[in-house]
Amino acid sequence: MPTFVTIGYGDRAGYDRTAPALRDAAHAADAALRQAGAVMGVAGGPVQVRNPGAAGVATEDGPFMASALPVAGFALIEAESLAEAVALVAKTPCAVAHGVVEVWPLLEAP
């Protein structure tokens, strides 16, 4: 079955202005995804890693990408299609609490 990487973006303000019943339903959707085998986690602090020309590793704290909303978490989910993956994450907290979820198909390495 195809695997998808999801990235949830959202902030506390959006979460707080979402009706509690809707938030509860969104957390139940997350729990159902976990029960179905999704690997989920809350985003911690990122570290950039560079090793140009394999000449030495350099790290820098902080994200490389920028977004209007902070990264809230990540998940690996399995779904039959991109449309099914979208339908699954459309019910999760970041999607319903004024955030956004990106869905990336995880392709096999050549």
Image (cartoon, rainbow, N blue to C red):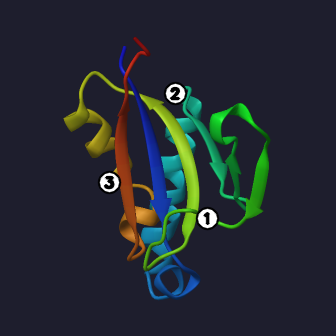
Dot 2 crowding, Cα within 10 Å, few <14, some 14–19, many 20+: few
- Upstream in the sequence, badge 2 or badge 3? 2
Residue drawn where x is 69% and y is 67% of the image: 62
Judging by the rendered image, the residue that carries numbered circle 2 is 36
The quadrant in which the N terminus is found is top left
What is the three-letter code of the residue carrying label 3? Ala
Residue contact at pointers 2 and 3, CB within 8 angstroms: no
Label 2 residue SS? loop
Q: Is residue 89 left or right of residue 52?
A: left
**Which quadrant of the view contains residue 3?**
top left
Q: Residue at x 77, y 55 (%)?
A: 59
Q: Residue at x 57, y 44 (%)?
A: 31
Disc 1 to disc 3, C-alpha distance: 25 Å
**Towards the viewer: 79 or 31:** 79
Q: Earlier in the sequence, mark 1 or mark 3?
A: 1
Disc sitting over residue 100 in the figure? none
Question: Mark 3 sits on what residue?
Answer: 90
Query: Could you tell me which secondary element the residue under label 1 belongs to?
Result: loop
